[in-house]
Amino acid sequence: MFSKACEYGLKASIYIAMSSYDGNRVSLKEIAKEIDSPEAFTAKILQDLVRNKIIKSVKGAYGGFEIEKGDIATIKLSQIVKAIDGDSIYHGCGLGLHVCDENHPCPVHDQFKGIRNQLKHMLESTNLEQLALDIKSGVSFLKL
Amino acid sequence: MFSKACEYGLKASIYIAMSSYDGNRVSLKEIAKEIDSPEAFTAKILQDLVRNKIIKSVKGAYGGFEIEKGDIATIKLSQIVKAIDGDSIYHGCGLGLHVCDENHPCPVHDQFKGIRNQLKHMLESTNLEQLALDIKSGVSFLKL
DNA sequence: ATTAATTAGGACAAATTAGTCCTATTTGTT
DNA sequence: AACAAATAGGACTAATTTGTCCTAATTAAT
Ligand code: FES
Ligand code: FES
């Protein structure tokens, strides 16, 4: 469904959101440990998210990653997925036709469109705050 | 969503179903041309589907691929996807946790589960005959 | 029997994705 | 100023997926 990079990006973002919610900036090392991801690879992905202005980074000693408190509830999963995997998941054809076109549909177009739209809706209606709070309250988990 | 191999496998199966519906066995060359896929790669995928007894192959001159008429309506997309991509799409975690477990859910588990189930239902309730007939009637297309 | 058409299958090559390593840069602390 | 802790980024390697090529085996037609 999502690339590994995207999975790590989502988990990292949720973890950063959770920490930022409590006012704690977190380091790459801590993030990688808490989401159980390869550190150097995670670094690349976080760089990407920083470039896309989804998260913020602070260099140097006591630096790390954070999300402004006010932004936590406004960042939707769709932004993260789009930044990392692009948006082919939104408009790509399920059978890999060059374009998904209502007027020239592939055999599974009608069935697939519904799923794609549900996924899109899910990603656009879920924000980091909701997920971060679930982690904090022990309802959901980022590893194991 | 699906691997390229799976996309080709689905399209090839639909094309074979359509031909077999009319009693025509088809060659690899014809299939690859009609679904716009790399021939040698498509051959591997068809071998796989033959091994999984989803389609039948006949060697030698005038050989090719076919599906028994009576089977066309019984073959579900889920069988093809399972044969090629495995069934991780059915029970895998959206964020890549080792297992998707109700008792130890990832942050997007609840939202993701719904989409996964809808996809599963779609693949299990769609058979080759339906799709082949749409192609035959010009409602849907396998390439371009 | 020979030939031509065809699938089967192994070995390989190319492209993409995943992941590592090293160095540069930034910045707070001493 | 020196140091230590951190992100940024380039170059590289590894693994996986995608795709090619060649040869063997099979089979119908001649
Ligand atoms: S054309 Fe294939 S999903 Fe729309
Ligand atoms: S645990 Fe992630 S989808 Fe179920």
Image: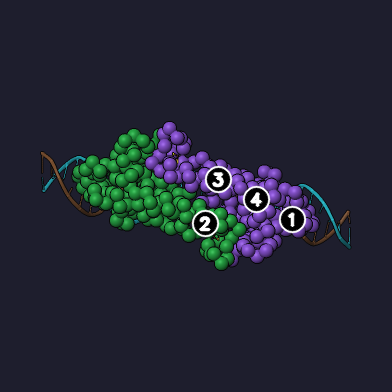
Chain colours: A green, B purple, C brown, D cyan
Q: Is residue B81 left or right of residue A58?
A: right
Label 2 chain ID:
A
Residues at discs 3 and 2 in contact (Cβ within 8 Å) = no
Amino acid at dot 1: Ser
Q: Position of residue A33 (x, y in %)?
A: 33, 38
- Residue with the mark numbered 1: B20
> Residue C24's image quarter?
bottom left
Q: Quadrant of the C terminus of chain B?
A: bottom right
Alpha carbon distance from label 1 to label 3: 26 Å
Amino acid at dot 3: Lys
Amino acid at dot 4: Asn
Q: Earlier in the sequence, mark 3 or mark 4?
A: 3
Residues at discs 4 and 2 in contact (Cβ within 8 Å) = no
Q: Which mark is residue A113?
A: 2
Q: Position of residue B125 (x, y in %)?
A: 61, 48
Q: Would residue A98 be visible to someone looking at this image?
A: no
The 10 Å Cα crowd at callout 4, few under 14, some 14 to 19, many 20 or more, is: many
Label 4 chain ID:
B
Alpha carbon distance from label 1 to label 2: 28 Å
Alpha carbon distance from label 3 to label 4: 13 Å
- Residue with the mark numbered 4: B127
Q: Earlier in the sequence, mark 4 or mark 1?
A: 1
Q: Position of residue B118 (x, y in %)?
A: 52, 47
- Residue at left 37%, top 37%? A140
The 10 Å Cα crowd at callout 1, few under 14, some 14 to 19, many 20 or more, is: many
Q: Secondary structure at mark 3?
A: helix
Towards the viewer: D24 or A37: A37
- Residue with the mark numbered 3: B120
